[in-house]
Image (tube, grey):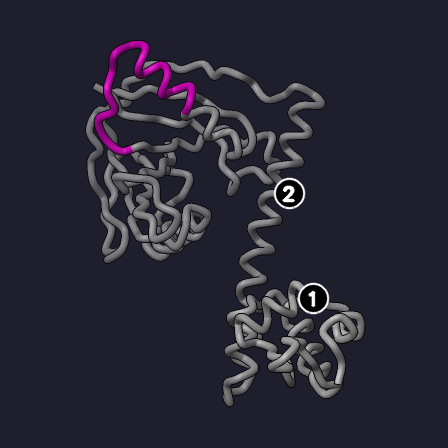
């Protein structure tokens, strides 16, 4: 048997943490001397210590580890769940890394514009083909465009006949998932479709505060800041759904620097 200090050295776990494990009933001393209060541990307990340390390295919390060591269920389910969590964490970290790289680049070359030129525009009534759906996230919008093109191809519509491409965001608030997005492409003349997914309709005239943005979509938060200040300064109010017009979209151009997007907020 080993005193707690000796067991601390053998297990490479601090005395403070061993006491904490005891409080959680995760790892209790083998024996506590009723007269002296000394805690004694057995060498056989080092096997459990090693399991605890290994599971901690895998990112499991102490409460999860306690459950895993006391349950009779297979550990595979716990590992698979943790693997999924790690994949989500890695995606978040990758996104943060990209943002940091852009920020470093902006500071180094001072390419991040502080202000954007806001314009007041009137968009005339248009005939459009429209496809609307709930998407997992805003990043899924490209799949919606692919669905639209596929449907139009089935109807033997000449895609060269299409004009302005636009995405309308119907949710009343910003949402991280299950987002309501409608995409539209304008056209002139007549167009009769038998598709159950794609609609043909007229879009009314819209008055909007807009900014034409060149390059990556990471600028959107700066653009909306400029638009918000302009709307407030000119005593307008937002009335309607935000929409984007894609003058040069990712489907047309692979180079990010060549993308041209117009961010629009309807106003009154």
Question: Which of the 4 image quarters holds residue 55?
Answer: bottom right
Q: Residue at the location (42% across, 26% down)?
A: 262
- Disc 1 target residue: 15
The quarter of the picture where the C terminus appears is top left
Residue 21 vs residue 146, the one in the foreground = 21
Question: Residue at horizontal 30%, vertical 47%?
Answer: 180
Q: How far across and down, in percent of the image, does residue 91 sit?
A: 57, 53
- Residue 251 is at least partly visible in this image: yes
The percent position of residue 36, horizontal first and vertical second, equals 66, 76
Which corner quadrant holds the N terminus?
bottom right
What is the tally of numbered marks visible in this picture?
2
Q: Which residue is mark 2?
A: 97
Marking on residue 150: none
Q: Position of residue 144 (x, y in %)?
A: 39, 51
Q: Is 188 rendered above or below residue 158?
A: above
Q: Earlier in the sequence, mark 2 or mark 1?
A: 1
CB-based contact (under 8 Å), mark 2 and mark 1: no
Q: Is residue 136 magenta?
A: no
């Amino acid at each position: 048997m080993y005193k707690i200090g000796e067991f601390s050295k053998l297990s490479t776990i601090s005395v403070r943490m061993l006491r904490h494990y005891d409080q959680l009933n995760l790892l209790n001393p083998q024996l506590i001397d009723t007269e002296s209060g000394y805690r004694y541990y057995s060498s056989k307990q080092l096997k459990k210590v090693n399991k605890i340390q290994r599971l901690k390295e895998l990112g499991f919390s102490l409460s999860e580890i306690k459950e895993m060591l006391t349950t009779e269920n297979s550990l595979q389910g716990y590992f698979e769940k943790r693997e999924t969590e790690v994949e989500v964490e890695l995606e978040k970290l990758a996104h943060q890394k990209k943002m940091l790289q852009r920020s470093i680049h902006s500071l180094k070359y001072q390419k991040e514009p502080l202000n954007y030129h806001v314009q007041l525009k009137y968009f005339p009534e248009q005939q459009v083909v429209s496809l609307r759906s709930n998407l997992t996230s805003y990043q899924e919008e490209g799949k919606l465009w692919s669905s639209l093109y596929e449907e139009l191809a089935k109807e033997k519509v000449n895609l060269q006949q299409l004009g302005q491409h636009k995405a309308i965001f119907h949710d009343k608030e910003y949402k991280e998932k299950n987002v309501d997005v409608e995409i539209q492409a304008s056209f002139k003349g007549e167009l009769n479709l038998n598709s159950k997914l794609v609609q043909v309709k007229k879009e009314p005239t819209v008055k909007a505060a807009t900014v034409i943005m060149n390059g990556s979509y990471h600028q959107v938060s700066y653009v909306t800041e400029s638009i918000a200040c302009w709307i407030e300064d000119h005593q307008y109010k937002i009335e309607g759904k935000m929409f984007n017009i894609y003058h040069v979209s990712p489907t047309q151009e692979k180079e990010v620097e060549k993308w041209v997007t117009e961010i629009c907020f309807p106003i009154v």
